[in-house]
Amino acid sequence: ALQMREQCLCLVSRLANQYAISPPTVRIIHSGHACNVEEERYTERVYTIREGETLELTCLVTGHPRPQIRWTKTAGSMSDRFQDSSVFNETLHIAKILRTQGGRYYCKAENGLGSPAIKSIRVDVYYLDEPVVTVHQSIGEAKEQFYYERTVFLRCVANSNPPVRYSWHRGREVLTQGSDKGVEIYEPFFTQGETKILKLKNLRPQDYANYSCIASVRNVCGIPDRSVIFTLTNRTASPSIKLLVEDPIVVNPSQTVSLVCITTGGEPPPVLTWGSSNDSLPQRSVVNGGTLTLPAITSEEAGAYSCVASNNVGNPAKKSTTIVVRALKKGRFWITPDPYHNDDNIQIGREVKISCQVEATPPEELTFSWLKNGRALRSSERMVITQTDPDISPGTTNLDIIDLKFTDFGTYTCVAALKGGGIPEISIDVNISSTTVPPNLTVPRGKSPLVAREGDTVELECLVSGKPKPIILWSRADKEAPMPDGSMQMESYDGVLRIVNVSREMTGSYRCQTSQYNGFNVKPREAVVELIVQYPPTVEPVFMEMRQGLGRPVVMTCRVLRAHPSRVLRFEWLLSNRLLHAGAFDAQRDETEYTVRNLNRDGLGEYTCNVINEAGAGKCTFLVTGEDSCPGNTLQWCTFCNKPQRQCFLSFQGKLLTVSKCEVPICSCLVCKESHPRAL
């Protein structure tokens, strides 16, 4: 019985130690398809894996309370930039690992006690791509010649990790340095270990043969050797091509465009590919050999298209053409009163200019015409029509009315068209009359300052009068910051700026001002609207676990970092949704405290402090756990349940009562009795 008692107490002691408060420790173990795991200097561990296999690293941690785990990765040797690929599980699992995912992986564990525990392991991903042989020729007549005979260079390149080794064969013959006076094998100093060049000097009949380059990484990770064959003949030549299209190609929207590219030389026969200035071909494009078809082309698909021919001999051949899609857009006008008298109004007997602007593609096809009250208007001494240089984009036309008369009042129409036709004209009407007046801008009463809550949809408003009414431009007035859509300026045709899901960063002053577009070309009128965005308090700590012995005091402090409005703050302290205390903040204080003077079992649990303003509430949470002083030979065993919940063993006086998920921390005194040996 005495021996059983000692064993029982020992086991209980181990359990108590297991659940005692302790800082984190961590180590990394591996599984999956490792080729090799080796220890290097300075205790660095290197995990080697083949590309395409599954990487599995497990972070084993100890510590109480349960530490939080975070995996991070730094880039491999090609880059020192930090890449955030964090995983918050014990096991990091990467299926079909890529070469770019090699690097150093860190496991970090922390539970608020002491310093975080960090371990790392370097992951080296091995791979070997198919080698590529390219051929380059040196002709005796070439300028800056290095060789006076006809020389051919065969260059072999294969991407790999670890570094690759190459060997050359001519037919079945193994070529080595010195084995043939007409052959040299070397590595260029600037690509050591990456390429192997086979130099054929002063070509001989036997040099026209099949050459094979074998790339090897010595079967590491079970990666087999790879090889490529190139046939050198007296007809081997670099590619040449021809585009059977004009440059540029001007088309109308929705038109089907076909680009045809043919090879005019090259041995072996070149392979043709298509590319565009937009990095990728349009999704609906169709490539059939050397023909690229773009069905129902749009303005977004305009740009440069290139045909590239490659046969690994010399440099690839490339021919390009540009597709221009006709378009007319952004038709605008403005009225300029007599500039010589600095007028803001148009007046009888003085000059007035009407300007019309359109963005045209291509700009050289843009033409303008003017109408008055629907009838064609020609340039004269008193009605002067001018047009800007078509190379200036966007194009502009001006109608100068000299010595304005009452009979000149009416509707003037500017018509923009493209010579090629096929797309609709743009017509812009401008009314000139005694009621044509410059704009005026005001902010409606009660619309500034405008108070909103974070997440609301708000409308900032400026009233614009005048005839015609111009476009209103909105921008930030209090700082150089972008507008809600990311631009520095937003347009409004009705004077209203609508902001969806407004955030606290959008608080500030907004300037509305008249633009010259679709109105008078005079000094802008402007006004300012104040926007105040209210948001709930941001508080700290968001969550804190506090441990204290029973019978001792506990002080909890909830601090306000920022809130708007900040002066209308009140607080509520709760224990398990039971209200303990409530009140308002002093003007000089930004925190509230709650004290438990004598902690008992009823005081254990989750305390919540809600800090409230007009916009909502911020919440501090405190998890209070206690420790007993156990009498006699009993041992204390405290289990702490943090979110997310985990299983706890509930026991009392040596009896294992139940295994369950607990909502609150449990502390109990354990007594090991001989009559209950199975209790543990």
Image: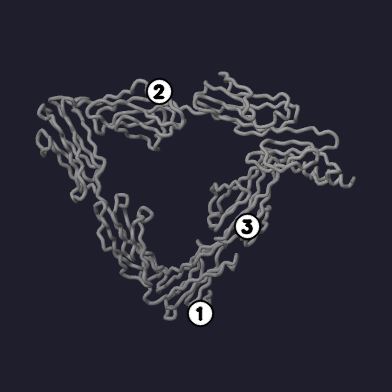
Say which element carries label 1: loop
**Residue 562 in view here:** yes
Three-letter amino acid code at disc 1?
Arg
Q: Which mark is residue 172?
A: 1
Q: Residue furthest right?
A: 2
Disc 1: CA contacts within 10 A as few (<14), some (14-19) or many (>=20) = few
**Residue 172, image x, y percentages:** 51, 79
Three-letter amino acid code at disc 2?
Pro
Q: Are marks 3 and 2 in contact (CB under 8 Å)?
A: no
Residue nearest the observer in this picture, 77 or 644: 644
Give whichever of discs 2 and 1 has the lower sequence position. 1
Which residue corresponds to mark 3? 47
**Residue 179, placed above or below residue 57:** below
Residue nearest the observer in this picture, 254 or 222: 254
Which residue corresponds to mark 2? 449
- Quadrant including the C terminus: top right
Tell me how far mark 1 sits from mark 3, CA to CA.
Answer: 39 Å
**Residue 529, image x, y percentages:** 37, 25
Three-letter amino acid code at disc 3?
Tyr
Tell me how far mark 3 sits from mark 2, CA to CA.
Answer: 62 Å
Residue nearest the observer in this picture, 333 or 308: 333
Q: Residue at x 31, y 59 (%)?
A: 320
**Residue 91, image x, y percentages:** 62, 51
Give whichever of discs 1 and 3 has the lower sequence position. 3
Quarter of the figure with residue 486: top left
Q: Residue at x 26, y 63 (%)?
A: 244
Say which element carries label 3: strand
**Residue 343 in view here:** no
Give whichever of discs 3 and 2 has the lower sequence position. 3
- Which numbered disc, 1 or 3, marks the residue closer to the eye? 3
Disc 3: CA contacts within 10 A as few (<14), some (14-19) or many (>=20) = many
